[in-house]
């Protein structure tokens, strides 16, 4: 009996041994990060939109929603910050080109988690290395992921993604002569394969895992399955003006925006709906966009169901956010890009007619269109401007956090106004995983852990100080509730007090000249401090 007791105590002590940090091995959560592409703050049902997103709404109802969460203003800068906890200038300082890959000295989120004993997988869009080198040193399966299925390019044909791969090997055979292939479904299919393989492998099933699911929905091109498009037929006959009003009212009702903030004016490039040309075509653009999102939500539901079926959902920390705001860009007839290939189905060639051609209804693979200014303006309700800009419409994103075993019980279904930024996510996830301290390069982490918010102890949150942006058509700095922002690199600065004026309508730059001047200098100092010169760097070696 004594020997049995000793064996029990010994086994218990082993089970409670610290792995790397403050949490016990049995308490370390699985981590699932889901990123959507080019979507506005108001698109989801749980953030005020009419698009049907029941699975994300359910996650929000059982989790926590952030209403002051920021990303960068374009795809790869946000993904660079997510993977490193750094601003994109230092995570990938190549003056706007993602092809060079992440900084060779930077530790990526999957590298840090794998070092801590996690299994690591990715499915979806990477956009942080050279598409010409699918097996190159900065490909995701060489920067910390055990396996990677997806695309490297910044955009993707949903029916025939040109650079589809699995661990550096082409997977275009999945869609060639396959009329049922759809990239959003395929991303999920492979994410579930990773989960299933992990669960059935006795040597790894006890390890926690990190799964990064990076959907290309709802980035252009407007490609969706016919049945999903049909579901939204006629839903947008009211037009973008009425849609913005309806969303704004719902957002105020839900509490995701301050009811005192007015709706920003319709963008100057957007006509009143009554004067819009080709209304049937305009409606179809938004119908396809909504169809892409609902399909993505359905697939997110498949991931959640898998976690529940295997008993892993309760201790899975699931995060969902966007990479930037809705994209207004209109595309010409010469634009398809290297990420698309013309399709052959049953031996029949399917030529693509690129460009936003009024009368050519988007949706099938033979089209290559975007939803344009009017609907992007609605997606970003109630804010101004779009992707590529650092006004709120380009950089404010939903953040949904679900973690039944880790989230403070009284936070279930709640909202938080605490400010967060995508640079905070790597420190937060490493904190939740109980990892040893990671010394980040070429700069220390520029974000902070948001774990105290999730634990219900926001008073323990480290002060954020100042947030910075500078990319493409935007530049901004936020200090406390004050934000200095410019719409163009050399354009005039605008100053807003966001707690009172979250839709950035009352420019105080002339009323607060000293504050504006000081903040402008702080932004300039940051640019200088983090200037790595864009010089060509040594490339990391394959592990």
Image (cartoon, rainbow, N blue to C red):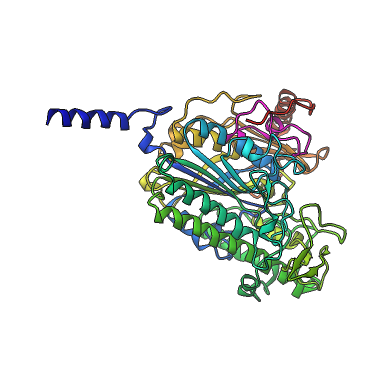
Seen in the image, is 93 located left or right of residue 355? Answer: left
- Residue appearing at x 83%, y 63% in the figure: 354
Q: Is residue 56 left or right of residue 352?
A: left
Relative image position of residue 426 (x, y in whole percent): 55, 35
Residue reaching furthest right? 334
Q: Which residues are magenta?
A: 84-109
- Residue 95's x, y, as percent? 79, 34
- Is 69 placed above or below 190 here? above
Q: Left or right: 400 with respect to 330? A: left
Overall secondary structure of the magenta stretch? loop
Residue 105 sits inside the magenta stretch: yes
Quarter of the image that includes the N terminus: top left
Q: Indicate whether 10 appears above or below 492.
A: above
Q: Is residue 356 left or right of residue 190?
A: right
Question: Could you say where residue 188 lies in the image, as x and y percent from the top left?
Answer: 56, 56
For residue 529, what is the image quadrant? top right
Q: Is residue 347 above or below residue 130?
A: below
As drawn, 454 above or below 183: above
Residue 534 part of the magenta-drawn span: no
Front residue (pair 140, 42): 140
Res. 270 image quadrant? bottom right
Q: Could you tell me residue 76's position as x and y percent?
A: 70, 42
Q: Nearer the viewer, residue 292 or 454?
A: 292
Find residue 492 and report its image quarter: top right
């Amino acid at each position: 009996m004594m020997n049995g007791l000793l064996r029990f105590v010994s086994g218990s002590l082993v089970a409670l041994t610290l792995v790397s940090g403050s949490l016990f091995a049995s308490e370390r959560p699985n981590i699932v990060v889901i990123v959507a592409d080019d979507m506005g703050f108001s698109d989801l049902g749980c953030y005020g939109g009419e698009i049907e997103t029941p699975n994300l709404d359910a996650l929000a109802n059982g989790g926590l929603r952030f209403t002051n969460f920021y990303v960068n203003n374009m795809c790869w800068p946000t993904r660079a910050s997510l993977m490193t906890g750094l601003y994109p200038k230092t995570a990938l300082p190549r003056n706007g080109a993602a092809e060079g890959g992440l900084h060779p000295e930077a530790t990526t989120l999957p590298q840090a988690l794998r070092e801590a004993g996690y299994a690591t997988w990715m499915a979806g869009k990477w956009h942080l290395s050279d598409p010409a080198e699918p097996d190159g040193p900065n490909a995701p399966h060489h920067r910390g992921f055990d396996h990677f299925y997806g695309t490297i390019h910044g955009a993707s044909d949903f029916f025939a993604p040109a650079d589809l791969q699995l661990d550096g090997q082409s997977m275009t055979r999945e869609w060639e002569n396959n009329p049922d292939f759809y990239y959003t479904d395929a991303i999920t299919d492979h994410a579930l394969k990773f989960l299933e393989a992990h669960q059935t492998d006795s040597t790894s099933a006890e390890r926690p895992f990190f799964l990064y699911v990076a959907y290309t929905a709802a980035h252009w091109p407007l490609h969706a399955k016919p049945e999903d498009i049909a579901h939204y037929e006629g839903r947008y006959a009211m037009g973008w003006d009425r849609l913005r009003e309806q969303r704004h009212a719902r957002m105020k009702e839900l509490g995701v925006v301050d009811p005192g903030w007015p709706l920003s004016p319709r963008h100057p490039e957007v006509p009143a709906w009554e004067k819009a040309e080709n209304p049937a075509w305009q409606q179809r653009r938004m119908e396809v966009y909504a169809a892409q999102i609902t399909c993505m939500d359905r697939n997110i539901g498949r991931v959640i169901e898998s976690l529940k079926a295997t008993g892993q959902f309760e201790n899975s920390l699931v995060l969902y956010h966007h990479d930037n705001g809705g994209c207004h860009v209109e595309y010409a007839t010469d634009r398809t890009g290297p990420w698309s290939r013309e399709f052959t189905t049953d031996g029949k060639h399917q030529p693509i007619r690129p460009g936003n051609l009024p009368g050519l209804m988007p949706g099938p693979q033979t089209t290559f269109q975007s939803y344009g200014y009017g609907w992007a303006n609605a997606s970003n309700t109630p804010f101004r401007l779009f992707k590529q800009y650092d006004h709120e419409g380009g950089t404010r994103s939903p953040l949904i956090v679900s973690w039944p075993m880790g989230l403070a019980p009284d936070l279930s279904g709640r909202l938080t106004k605490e400010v967060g930024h995508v640079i905070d996510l790597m420190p937060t996830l490493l904190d939740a995983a109980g990892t040893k301290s990671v010394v980040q390069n070429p700069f220390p982490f520029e974000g902070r852990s948001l774990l105290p918010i999730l634990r219900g102890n926001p008073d323990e949150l480290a002060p954020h100080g100042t947030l910075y942006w500078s990319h493409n058509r935007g530049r901004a700095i936020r200090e406390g509730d004050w934000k200095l922002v410019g719409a163009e690199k050399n354009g005039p600065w605008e100053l807003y007090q966001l707690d009172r004026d979250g839709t950035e309508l009352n420019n105080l730059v002339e009323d607060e000249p000293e504050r504006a001047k000081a903040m402008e200098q702080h932004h300039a100092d940051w640019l200088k401090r983090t200037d790595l010169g864009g010089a060509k760097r040594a490339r990391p070696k394959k592990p």
